[in-house]
Amino acid sequence: MTLTSRAFQQGGTIPMKYTCDGDNISPPFAWSGVPEGTRSFVLLCDDPSAPSGIFHHWAAYDIPWDWRRLAEGHGPESLADYLGEFRDILASHRLEDMVCVRRVVFDMDSNWKCFVENYSDGYHIPHVHRDSLSRWKSVSTRVTPSNENYTASFSAHEGSQLLLPFPDYVGFPAMPEIDEKWKTGTFFTTLRPGMMMTLGNDGALVFRSEPLSATQSRLTVSSLFPKSTVARNDFEEIVQNYYRRNAIVVGEDVAVSLRQHAGIESPYARMALLCRTERSLNQIANWILDRVIGPQA
């Protein structure tokens, strides 16, 4: 097994924060290479070089077999801590009052990261969706506060990008409870490692990209709408416009992900330099290095 910590390197100095001279809490830990048949874990923190001999600082035991990390101060990292301000930013969209009305699954011959990178790329919409989403004319785009686990940007415009800006794409009215500043526009969010959400003022489209192997992945696309919207007598008729939009736009997303993976597999593939609008791709790569592979890589 391999045990690592994001707080310090192997053989390095443990930051004062994790000592009795600081906050006196345990560092975050992660581990890999778990033997088959493992039932639980015990983590001991001993100081073999203490003046009085081996000094036992603390122990964490009965750690469930399927855990692969401990957050600061013991225990798994809570979902609230992981999400940070993400919940507050999207609170008025009231995702808890939405229901999934359709789920479409794509088994793709591409690495799972291809879809995530394309969704996050600043060049994605104007090039991949040149004749669809790019027809929306945004007044402005602003990036809301983010942490290492998520990003959220808001594109201000009339209508909802859960539809296309063409006359025959009639949609549902905006949800009345949304904060006034979010009523005219669409959120594009990424929750690492592989979850993305497009939130309009009328509903949400949720993407989950998960690996099946190094060269295969599964993309699950879920359409969400408020319960009050689903209860409308004309729901089944109007929602078809959203499904038509998804067939076009998600189809373009899947196609470019397959092309990207084919390019990666090419013997002529080279790592390209990233420009200003592609910073998020570097953030994704660093997240995987820090949270999945660890500092020993």
Image (cartoon, helix red, strand yellow):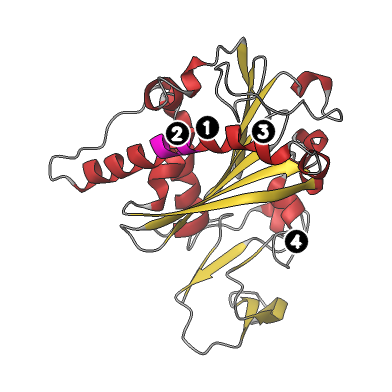
Q: Residue 7 appears at what percent x and percent y?
A: 59, 54
Q: Which mark is residue 25?
A: 4
Instruction: Give left or right: position of 48 versus 16.
Output: left
SS for dot 1: helix
Give the residue at x 60% y 81%.
65
Asked if the residue under mark 1 is in contact with the one under mark 3, i.e. CB atoms within 8 Å, the reply is no
SS for dot 2: helix
Q: Main secondary structure of the magenta part?
A: helix
Mark toward the start of the polypeptide (4 vs 3): 4
Instruction: Give left or right: position of 277 versus 207.
Output: left
Q: Residue 289 appears at what percent x and percent y?
A: 45, 51
Comparing labels 3 and 2, the label whose residue is closer to the camera: 3
- Is 68 within the magenta? no
Comparing labels 4 and 1, the label whose residue is closer to the camera: 1
The residue sitting at the left extreme is 267
Disc 2 from disc 1: Cα separation: 5 Å
Give the residue at x 70% y 65%.
76
Asked if the residue under mark 1 is in contact with the one under mark 2, i.e. CB atoms within 8 Å, the reply is yes
Three-letter amino acid code at the position of disc 4: Ile
Disc 4 from disc 1: Cα separation: 50 Å
| Residue carrying label 1 | 245
Give the residue at x 29% y 40%.
260
Q: Which mark is residue 238?
A: 3
Q: Which residues are magenta?
A: 247-253
| Residue carrying label 2 | 248
Asked if the residue under mark 4 is in contact with the one under mark 2, i.e. CB atoms within 8 Å, the reply is no
Three-letter amino acid code at the position of disc 2: Ile
Mark toward the start of the polypeptide (3 vs 2): 3
Comparing labels 3 and 1, the label whose residue is closer to the camera: 3
Three-letter amino acid code at the position of disc 1: Arg
| Above-or-below relation of 254 to 185 | below
Q: Is 222 or 4 nearer to us in this picture?
A: 222
